[in-house]
């Protein structure tokens, strides 16, 4: 199937913009480019792209402002480009509604995988996957109706909280959820010990899923930012 | 010394010194009855105060108080003020001169110390800059040369040649990425006087993150992982410690000739987390062992084309990161061959662990 997804790239560096445009076009995507925030906004409104790739450091406005502006009316997925050391920027952008981030510098494969995963997760969120159905990745199957998880055909025993976390992450598979986002949805409130509570639960989940460091098959940890459930090719 | 505590310290020092010297003087004049020593005693007190406090104000106050004390307790009529004697005026002037001169002297010495420290830092920065600029030129030559060859001679090149050139570009830019990460780290630590912000990090998540980053560059290098089964949290700046582990692993891949095993081991001992990176390669020369963590900054005339050697900056960066974490790093050759890098980080108090 040839994909006709329209992708808007908002990036002020000409070379990076060209490189992203080239790899997206050679993979069959339609690409629109903007070199600053305000023209990005205009193009977004006039072309309604399926996905936005956004650099956080724009000359005329903070990328986070653009995310907020888009999120006021649209749920179009946004992938941000950011430098490795700025965890706080990433967290801020994700909390404002960005779906995923790619750390600069990045390679072609990594970038395309993120684009594919983000587009797929949106497609699934929109209809195919709802509570009451099932979700599967690799050799794992989650049955939302029976609240059970099968790993290679064997049922995994999770506590209520652990199951809730896995369910939340799997519903948003392919998307990075920040610590505070998960905590808010699972416990409803946050205090100083919340992150640790979440990390302890995650450690138990990892153990029950037999995850090995560096080879996580199901849940990916984004150090200092949050967690994401793996989609098929991530 | 903390800035807020400085004035309190100064006042305390001034008061205590004056009281102590006043007491000694009283004892001398009452018990030994040697009044001629008293002036010298107060001169000494004023000198000490000017020496160990900041600025002129404490010394001047102290010298005025000393003149009053002299007048009151040690000059006839005893325990009564009498300002009509010219002797008083002279001793007051002498005290003030002592104060001002010694305060000026101390301030000058302090300034010189600061200049020297600043100069030392400047020298280190200049050395680093020189070495780095030198090291950046080599990969940039590849990148510039190869890419312009592709752009300008596109038709004359075979597909294989283009791929070969592009591969060189990719490899050298990956090396540049590592270099730049390290330089950014250096500025991140130096800017705030080696102060870093620690937050609790789950060991397993750190190792996970390290391995993912490492495998991006070295997909074929196997690493044996040996970490505790328990849930371990270590307070640290995760980005920096990740950098340390990746640097040491990278160092092993690039320099441990003949390596067949690479082991990353973490264990808890004495409320500290010990990280060990062990390889069975060629080990490290004895002369290099001593300055392996500082070598980069001192390297002056390395051969012009050995740019891979400059990964040495990675180890210098490791050392400053671990120092900033109040930990310690060392390296030794294993008796059975290869070498072992070891560093430790302090754990939070055990009560916090689950």
Image (cartoon, coloured by chain):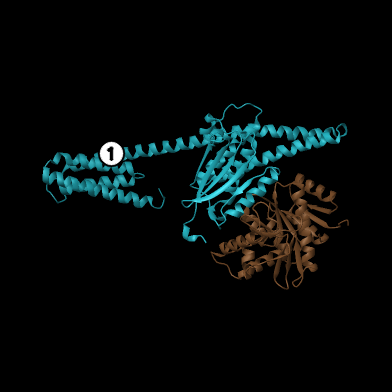
| Residue B276 seen anywhere in this rendered image of the structure | yes
- Front residue of B107/B224: it is B224
Q: Place residue A4 in its image quadrant.
A: bottom right
Q: Residues within 10 Å of mark 1 (few under 14, many from 20)?
A: many
| Residue A39 seen anywhere in this rendered image of the structure | no
- Indicate the position of residue B258 as horizontal and vertical percent values: 64, 34
Query: What residue appears at the point 56 percent right and 53 percent down from the top-left corner?
Result: B228
- In the image, taking residue A105 as reference, residue B122 lies left or right, namely left
- In the image, taking residue B271 as reference, residue B80 lies left or right, namely left
- Indicate the position of residue B334 as horizontal and vertical percent values: 54, 37
Image chain in brown: A
- In the image, taking residue A133 as reference, residue A205 lies left or right, namely left
Q: Place residue A38 in its image quadrant.
A: bottom right
- Indicate the position of residue B143 as horizontal and vertical percent values: 74, 35
- Front residue of B214/A158: it is A158
Q: Place residue A135 in its image quadrant.
A: bottom right
- Indicate the position of residue A133 as horizontal and vertical percent values: 77, 70
- Front residue of B89/B12: it is B12
- Front residue of B192/A183: it is A183
Provide the chain ID for the residue under circle 1. B
Count of numbered tags: 1
Which residue in the structure is indicated by mark 1?
A: B98
Q: Is residue A184 above or below residue B298?
A: below
Query: What residue appears at the point 84 percent right and 51 percent down from the top-left corner?
Result: A27
Q: Secondary structure at mark 1?
A: helix
Image chain in cyan: B
């Amino acid at each position: 199937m040839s994909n006709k997804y329209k992708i808007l790239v908002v990036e002020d560096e000409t070379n990076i913009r060209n490189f992203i445009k080239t790899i997206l076009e050679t993979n069959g995507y339609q690409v629109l480019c903007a070199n600053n925030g305000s023209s990005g906004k205009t193009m977004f409104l006039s072309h309604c792209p399926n996905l936005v790739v956004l650099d956080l450091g724009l000359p005329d406005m903070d990328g986070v402002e653009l995310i907020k502006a888009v999120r006021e009316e649209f749920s179009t997925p946004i992938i941000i480009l950011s430098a490795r050391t700025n965890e706080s920027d990433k967290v801020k952008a994700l909390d404002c509604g960005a779906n995923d981030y790619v750390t600069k510098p990045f390679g072609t494969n990594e970038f395309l995988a993120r684009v594919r995963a983000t587009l797929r997760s949106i497609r699934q969120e929109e209809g195919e996957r709802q509570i009451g159905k099932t979700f599967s990745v690799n050799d794992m199957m989650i049955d939302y109706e029976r609240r059970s998880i099968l790993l290679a055909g064997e049922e995994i025993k999770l506590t209520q909280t652990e199951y809730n976390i896995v369910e939340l992450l799997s519903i948003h598979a392919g998307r990075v959820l920040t610590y505070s986002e998960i905590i808010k949805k699972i416990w409803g409130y946050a205090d100083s010990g919340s992150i640790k509570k979440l990390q302890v639960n995650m450690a138990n989940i990892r153990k029950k899923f037999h995850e090995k460091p560096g080879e996580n098959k199901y849940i990916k940890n984004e150090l200092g930012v949050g967690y994401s459930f793996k989609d098929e090719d991530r | 010394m903390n800035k807020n505590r400085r004035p309190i310290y100064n006042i305390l020092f001034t008061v205590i010194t004056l009281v102590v010297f006043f007491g000694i003087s009283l004892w001398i004049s009452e018990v030994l009855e040697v009044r001629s020593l008293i002036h010298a005693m107060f001169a000494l007190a004023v000198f000490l105060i000017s020496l160990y406090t900041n600025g002129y104000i404490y010394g001047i106050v102290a010298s005025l108080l000393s003149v009053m004390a002299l007048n009151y307790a040690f000059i006839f009529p005893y325990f009564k003020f009498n300002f009509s004697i010219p002797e008083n005026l002279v001793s007051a002037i002498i005290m003030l001169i002592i104060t001002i001169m010694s305060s000026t002297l101390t301030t000058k010495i302090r300034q010189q110390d600061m200049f020297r420290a600043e100069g030392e830092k400047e020298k280190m920065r200049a050395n680093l800059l020189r070495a780095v600029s030198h090291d950046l030129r080599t990969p940039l030559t590849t990148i510039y040369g190869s890419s312009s060859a592709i752009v300008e001679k596109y038709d004359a090149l075979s597909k294989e040649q283009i791929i070969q050139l592009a591969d060189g570009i990719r490899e050298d830019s990956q090396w540049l990425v590592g270099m730049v990460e390290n330089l950014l780290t250096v500025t991140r630590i130096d800017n705030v006087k080696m102060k870093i912000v620690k937050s609790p990090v789950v060991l397993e998540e750190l190792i996970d993150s390290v391995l993912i980053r490492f495998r991006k560059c070295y997909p074929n290098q196997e690493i044996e992982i040996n970490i505790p089964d328990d849930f371990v949290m270590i307070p640290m700046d995760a980005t920096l410690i990740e950098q340390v582990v990746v640097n040491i692993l990278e160092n092993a891949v690039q320099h441990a000739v003949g390596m067949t095993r690479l082991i990353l081991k973490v264990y808890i001992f004495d409320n500290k987390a010990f990280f060990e990176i062990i390889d069975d390669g060629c080990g490290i020369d004895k002369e290099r062992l001593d300055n392996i963590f500082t070598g980069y900054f001192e390297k002056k005339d390395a051969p012009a084309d050995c740019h891979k050697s400059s990964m040495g900056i990675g180890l210098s960066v490791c050392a400053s990161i671990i120092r900033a974490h109040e930990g310690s790093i060392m390296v030794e050759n294993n008796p059975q061959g290869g070498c072992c890098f070891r560093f430790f980080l302090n754990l939070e108090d055990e009560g916090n662990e689950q």
